[in-house]
Amino acid sequence: MRISCQDCPLRKLDGFQAFSASDIKITDALKHGELRVDAGMPILEEGTSSPQLYTVLQGQGVRYKTLESGRRQVLSFVFPGDFLGLQAAVMEEMDHSVESTTEMVLCVFDRKDLRRLYRDAPERAFDVTWVAAEEETMLSEALTAVGQRTAKERVAWGLMRLMQRSKASGLAKRDRAPMPFRQTDFADAMGLSLVHTNKTLSIIRRAKLATWADGWLDIHDPKGLAEMAGTPLNGDHCRPLI
């Protein structure tokens, strides 16, 4: 059954800004339905122009680019509340792909409605702009980590970010979160080989800072992990939900 925006379970989470009655009415009117996707399925494909935009209601996935050689570069990880497809709506086609890692439920919007949203509901449209700016910030943080942090700092930072995203999207309980992503993809996102990543994860585990095993991430010492990463122990911004 279609979940109305009024009853959206993500609205209850502290990681998202509160909806006004007007926000709910506008968003619910734009929502065309829901799409259920099996694990391992493409949602958006690089070089294509999707007529639809999506908000992740349930499930997790990955964003990635494919090189001419066929090799894949993971850009980031997808969590509930993420808004997908905005790039194609503005620039006519995607320059990266999105694939489901788990089963997912997506709220579906028509890209044709985006201009109408900016015309008729500028405050709600600003939320879309905010989400785009936040995504750019996250990518710049990731690039800085890959370019300037040591392997230990990168892996520690990456684990912190995964936990922060999990908490903001309601997936984590305290410092334990489901982690369905492949460690190969995590290594790729951190700019490290799988062997180097596994060795670094072992160092972090032996230091009793964090453990990633059997599809779960446990942060045992958040402060210690932040010190290894060389970054403050901050949570995610409270962000708009589209």
Image: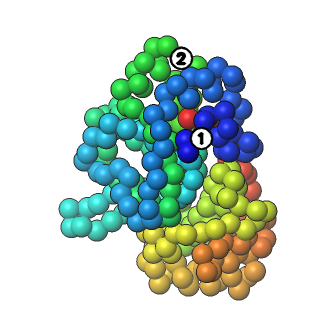
For this rendering, which residue is in front, 12 or 152?
A: 12
x and y percentages locating residue 195 in the rendered image = 47, 84
Q: Residue at x 31, y 44 (%)?
A: 94
- Secondary structure under tag 1 reads loop
**Residue 7, located in which quarter of the rendered image?**
top right
For this rendering, which residue is in front, 196 or 108?
A: 108
**Is residue 196 something that shows in the picture?**
yes
- Secondary structure under tag 2 reads loop
Tag 2: amino acid: Ala
Is residue 180 placed above or below 234 in the rendered structure? below
**Disc 1 vs disc 2: Cβ atoms closer than 8 Å?**
no
x and y percentages locating residue 233 in the rendered image = 74, 56
x and y percentages locating residue 30 in the rendered image = 49, 27
**Is residue 189 something that shows in the picture?**
no
Mark 2 highlights which residue? 121
The label nearer to you, 1 versus 2, is 1
Tag 1: amino acid: Ile
Residue 3 numbered tag: 1
Q: Residues within 10 Å of mark 1 (few under 14, many from 20)?
A: few
